[in-house]
Amino acid sequence: MDGEALHEIAIRTAMALPAVDETQPFSEGTFVYKVVGKMFAMTTELRGVPIVNLKCAPPHGASLVRDHDEITPGWHMNKQHWITLAPGPGIDEELVEDLVANAYELVVSGLPRARRPIDPARRAQAD
């Protein structure tokens, strides 16, 4: 997958989720995706290469980093709780969609019930 497709799929997937806001709090070209004010994804470039930072549970993140050359600990983020996706042959549309949805659900599950736009447990049962 090339960098343009990586960004396009991550953005499309994030914006299709309930109660997501796109902000640009850092620099031009860096977009942050939040649910109820909590960040779960970011698209930007690193040395001219498009990347996506995603919130990820530590054990899952460690296995993704181990199994995919294009996935590294989160750039400029808490490396235990964030991963960075870069373009490459080991990244496909389904993986990007799944990881963005997973990042969203991880953040939603940490919100107080009254502030959650969805019930992550109910969504997992539907899948």
Image (tube, rainbow, N blue to C red):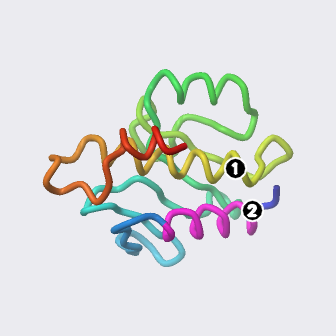
Q: Position of residue 24 (x, y in %)?
A: 40, 75
- Residue labelled with disc 1: 86
Range of magenta residues: 4-16
The quadrant the N terminus occupies is: bottom right
Q: Is residue 93 above or below residue 126?
A: below
Between 106 and 90, which is closer to the camera in this rendering?
Answer: 106
Question: Mark number for residue 109?
Answer: none
Q: Quadrant of residue 58?
A: top left
The tag earlier along the polypeptide, 1 or 2, is 2
Between 125 and 95, which is closer to the camera in this rendering?
Answer: 125
Where disc 1 sits, the SS reads loop
Q: Amino acid at mark 2?
A: Gly
Pointers 1 and 2 in contact (CB under 8 A)? yes
Q: Position of residue 30 (x, y in %)?
A: 50, 69
- Residue under the image location 55 percent in, 43 percent down: 127
Q: Is residue 9 left or right of residue 80?
A: right
Q: Position of residue 98 (x, y in %)?
A: 60, 46
- Residue labelled with disc 2: 3
